[in-house]
Amino acid sequence: MIAPIIQACDAISGARPGARREIMQQYLQRIKDLENLALAYPGVEKAYAIQAGRELRVIVEADKVTDVDSDKLSFEIAQKIQTEMTYPGQIKVTVIREKRAVNVAR
């Protein structure tokens, strides 16, 4: 009766960054690989792996990538991560496309 509770607690605590004693160099390399994978696509300005590598935020240039392209890019990056990398759990890929228009009235 107590075994399922212990298994659930272990799964929750194991999800924390560093809980499974991952070597720091391997962790940093995985984060860099995630960011570099996204930066390889045209129109990508910046890429940030956050939440211990569980989320990848990709910032694209608004004049080079359309809204439809950003949806496609998010899917392509997720598929490439799935086929080329090994990672614990899942990775959420978010593509951010922002257009700002700023003027000053004097």
Image (cartoon, rainbow, N blue to C red):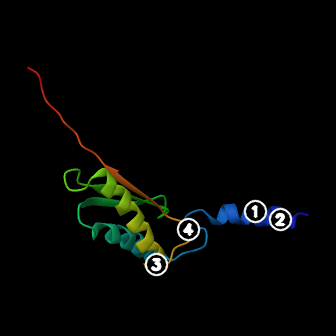
Amino acid beneath label 2: Pro
> Which residue shows up at 11% across the image and 22% down it?
105
Numbered badge on residue 8: 1
106 and 41: which one is in front? 41
Res. 4 mark: 2
Quarter of the figure with the N terminus: bottom right
**Among all residues in the image, which is located at the extreme right?**
1
Closest to the camera, between mark 2 and mark 4, is: 2
Badge 3 marks a residue whose secondary structure is helix
Mark 4 is on which residue type? Gly
Image disc number at residue 83: 3
Q: Which residue is mark 4?
A: 18
Which callout, 1 or 3, points to the residue nearer the camera? 3
Badge 4 marks a residue whose secondary structure is loop
For the residue marked with disc 1, what is the amino acid?
Ala
User: Residue at 34% of width from left, 51% of height from top?
Assistant: 96
